[in-house]
């Protein structure tokens, strides 16, 4: 098939590369000429394991191309994927200006039947707005005879495992309109995704609004599990229980399972925070309060300060004579994504309290430097108090540190040399925001250790 992908961000680039890899001819459009230039020069604007090789091989096979030419993009694809950003607006709702701009461009330039796919995470009812935007442009051109149908096909990609998630999905959700044109569009989508269903049927077909809702509902459920476990972890610290033992105890119940039950410093990234805000806004606009989700968001905001609260409790509010090593900056491993990353809150508290910070992350240092310019726009001199070690050696950050703070659970942090750690640090103190280590082992090694909900020893 000829496929056009509108937007070469995280979702668009992964979608385009994966669809090209199964034999489609994919035209990726972006209005940012610098991003397109980077892609055409062989660069990848985001970090995602396996994505670079996938893009390189499919560009070489002439199945994948990148351009800023809107008219050519519309002409190329029988199926037009809209995969642009939907950032949160000031009121928490999803900003659809880029989605609707993409829709209007399709209406301006289309000359034949198009399947228009909402791949971006969008509020319930967006397909109706996209349809109206395209139809308005067709009417302006006097081409109301041209047919199209808008389909909802939300993405379910985990950063750090997105290529694998796309190529081996656990479900493919397709929302369509049950009329003649909609059924034709559904046929196109079934053919497009047929290679992913050879082992067993993964496609879940439903009406458009249910498909739009399904994405928000999935992320809301996962975020709820995280905040629930974080609240339990904080209580476990108070009552002398071990949240890891609790996790294993409840996770063994098949009705609950083990996924998304790890206590930590809260969730971040591009999806959970904005999707929870958007869904609660949708509810308010429809006269309903989602009280559970409002609490999920509040708990997560507080959880990002749990580590620094422990630091301040031990060292006091004035940290001007303290140096802290910080391991992990990205919101999760295997990505350089710093959106809503808990490390930004941790760094904000430490630097504003006068501390010096030596930070390590295998991937996200350059992105961290960029976002910290925004976070400390009111006090740029504070950034002089943070430095970064080589990506190859996290232990270098420990030299002369009063404590180690772990924010992201990169594999490189799982088995540190504790004897070297004690030699390098002023005092062997670890604040572990991801519960990487066993408290009993740390105690035996002579390390002062505080995890999240694991301080029963």
Image (tube, rainbow, N blue to C red):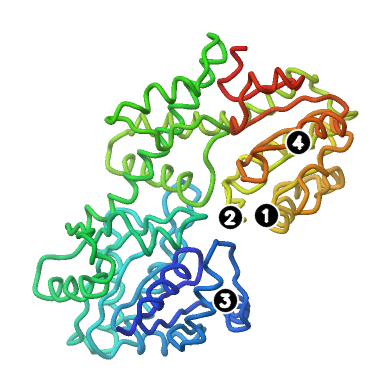
Task: Give the residue number, with chain letter if any, for mark 4.
Answer: 417
In the displayed structure, does residue 199 sit left or right of residue 274?
A: left
Q: Which quadrant would residue 370 be assigned to in this image?
A: bottom right
Choose between 439 and 65: the one closer to the eye. Answer: 439
**Marks 3 and 2, how far apart at CA:** 22 Å
Task: Give the residue number, with chain letter if any, for mark 3.
Answer: 32
Quick one: SS at disc 4?
loop
Task: Give the residue number, with chain letter if any, for mark 2.
Answer: 335
**Marks 2 and 4, how far apart at CA:** 25 Å
Task: Give the residue number, with chain letter if any, for mark 1.
Answer: 364
Q: Earlier in the sequence, mark 1 or mark 2?
A: 2
- How many other residues sit within 10 Å of disc 3, few (<14), some (14-19) or many (≥20)? few
**Marks 1 and 4, how far apart at CA:** 23 Å
For the N terminus, the quadrant is bottom left
Residue at the (28%, 66%) spot, across then down: 196
Tag nearer the camera, 3 or 4: 4
Proximity of marks 1 and 2: CB atoms separated by less than 8 Å: yes
Quick one: SS at disc 2?
loop
Residue at the (70%, 49%) spot, across then down: 361
Residue at the (73%, 18%) spot, across then down: 313
Number of numbered tags placed on the structure image: 4
Tag nearer the camera, 3 or 2: 2
Q: Earlier in the sequence, mark 1 or mark 4?
A: 1
Q: Position of residue 345 (x, y in %)?
A: 66, 38
- How many other residues sit within 10 Å of disc 2, few (<14), some (14-19) or many (≥20)? many
Tag nearer the camera, 1 or 4: 4
């Amino acid at each position: 098939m000829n496929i056009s992908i509108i937007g070469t961000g995280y979702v668009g680039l992964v979608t385009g590369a994966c669809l090209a890899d199964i034999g489609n001819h994919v035209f990726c459009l972006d209005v940012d000429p610098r991003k397109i230039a980077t892609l055409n020069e062989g660069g990848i604007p985001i970090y995602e394991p396996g994505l670079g090789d996938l893009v390189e091989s499919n560009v070489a096979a002439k199945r994948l191309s990148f351009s800023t030419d809107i008219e050519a993009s519309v002409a190329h694809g029988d199926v037009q994927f809209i995969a642009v950003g939907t950032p949160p607006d000031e009121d928490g709702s999803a900003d659809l200006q880029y989605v609707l701009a993409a829709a209007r461009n399709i209406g301006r330039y289309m000359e034949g039947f198009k399947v228009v796919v909402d791949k971006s995470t969008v509020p319930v009812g967006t397909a109706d707005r996209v349809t109206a935007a395209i139809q308005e442009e067709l009417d302006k051109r006097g081409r109301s005879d041209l047919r199209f149908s808008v389909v909802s096909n939300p993405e379910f990609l985990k950063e750090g495992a997105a290529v694998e998630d796309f190529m081996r999905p656990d479900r493919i959700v397709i929302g369509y309109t049950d009329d003649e044109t909609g059924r034709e569009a559904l046929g196109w989508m079934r053919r497009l995704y047929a290679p992913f269903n050879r082992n067993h049927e993964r496609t879940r077909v439903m009406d458009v609004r249910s498909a739009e809702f399904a994405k928000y509902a999935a992320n809301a459920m996962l975020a709820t599990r995280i905040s629930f476990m974080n609240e339990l972890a904080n209580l476990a610290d108070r009552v002398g229980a071990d949240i890891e033992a609790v996790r294993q105890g409840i996770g063994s119940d098949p009705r609950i399972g083990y996924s998304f039950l790890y206590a930590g410093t809260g969730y971040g990234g591009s999806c959970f925070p904005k999707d929870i805000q958007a869904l609660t806004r949708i509810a308010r606009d429809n006269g309903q309060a989602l009280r559970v989700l409002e609490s999920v968001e509040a708990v997560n905001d507080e959880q990002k300060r749990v580590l620094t609260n422990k630091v301040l409790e031990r060292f006091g509010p004035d940290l001007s004579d303290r140096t802290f090593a910080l391991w992990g900056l990205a919101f999760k491993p295997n990505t350089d994504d710093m959106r809503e990353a808990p490390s930004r809150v941790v760094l904000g508290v430490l630097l504003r309290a006068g501390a010096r910070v030596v930070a390590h992350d295998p991937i996200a240092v350059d992105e961290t430097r960029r976002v910290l310019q925004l976070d400390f726009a009111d006090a740029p001199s504070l950034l002089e108090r943070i430095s970064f070690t080589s990506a190859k050696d996290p232990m270098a950050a420990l030299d002369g540190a009063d404590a180690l703070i772990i924010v992201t659970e990169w594999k490189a942090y799982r088995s540190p040399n504790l004897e070297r750690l004690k030699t390098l640090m002023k005092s062997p103190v670890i604040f572990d925001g991801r519960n990487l280590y066993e408290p009993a082992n740390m105690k035996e090694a002579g390390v002062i250790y505080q995890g999240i909900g694991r301080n029963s020893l």
